[in-house]
Amino acid sequence: MRVRNEGYYFDAAALIPAGERLFSPEDAVKVGRALGRMHPRGIIGAAAGSSAAARAILAAATAGAAGAGAVVWEFGECFDSQFTYCVSRSGADFGIYADGAETLRIYSRGGLPPSVAESRKLLDLLETGGSDPASPGDYGTILSMPGLRELYRVELVKSAVCSLAGMTVSVKCPGQAVQSLLEDALTQLGCRLGEDGITLQVSADGRNVSVYQTVSDYIFTDRVLLLCCMDLFRRGQDVSVPASAPRVLDRLAAERGRRAFRYEDGFSSPDDRSARHLGIRQPFLRDGLMLGIRLL
């Protein structure tokens, strides 16, 4: 088996070598079972995208996790960044998300990417196969908790550090659910929606945002993150970013007497423990919608 880490998440579909076959519900059962064995009697947050295939893949994965004794909290239909918020807010030990491409994404506590050690342990459990079948009394439970995702609307508005009254903003996103949520939040914050101001371009999964204004060039995703981190430095705060984030952040932090802690996202980091502790309190630095609002 092979695995690659896509920066922010462990992509379980990469266990299937390219060109051999599609990721199947049978594969999802194995991944769910291995994840359930990672933290015996632990809590796993779960959600899926809008496609029938994603829902089927998730059902198989959650069955595998419950069969290994885990408690599964299902948040219903979510887009990616909404789901990671739910994982963080609920305090789940892990998160498992099935997207429209029939893949599974695995997250660690706080909606953070798994550490290198966690990824290796999951791979070891997958490669060694399943354990003996659980007795009926050892199965975990699957609970439906769709209401938690509605708190994401509130969190979007709270991510602003001031009123945005008087600004004109447009939102471009291939995902209608993402665009509608962000437009609603901007309206509540006092923005006027229109094409003659700033444009926030958000990815379909809600993870990334770039900014465009007719009188200037694009501000791409990495620079949006840098600008938001610089604002936190100015406010006397440290930041928690993935190990793959631009290295210039370390210099910018040092110039202001602050630190940029880095958590593992497929790349090793000596700051991992401290970064994860801080990162759980800074979900907006991993969320494109929240970053866009904070930048405004």
Image (spheres, helix red, strand yellow):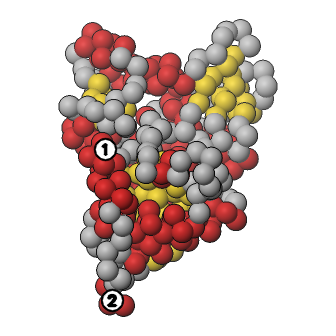
Observer able to see residue 221: yes
Horizontal and vertical percent position of residue 228: 44, 24
Point out the image quarter for the C terminus.
top right
Q: Amino acid at mark 1?
A: Ser
Q: Which mark is residue 135?
A: 2
Could you say whether the residue bearing mark 2 is in a helix, strand or loop?
Answer: loop
Up/down of 247 relative to 274, above or below: above
Q: Quadrant of residue 192?
A: top right
* Above or below, 188 relative to 39: above
Total marks in image:
2
Measuring from the top left, give residue 271's x and y in whole percent: 22, 32
Disc sitting over residue 263 in the figure: none
Q: Nearer the viewer, residue 59 or 183?
A: 59
Q: Residues within 10 Å of mark 2 (few under 14, many from 20)?
A: few
For label 1, the residue is: 115
Q: 46 and 210: which one is in front?
A: 46
Q: Quadrant of residue 242?
A: top left
Decide if residue 171 is on the left or right side of residue 121: right
Identity of the residue drawn at 59% across and 41% down? 206
Give the SS element for disc 1: loop
Q: CA distance from mark 2 to mark 1?
A: 31 Å
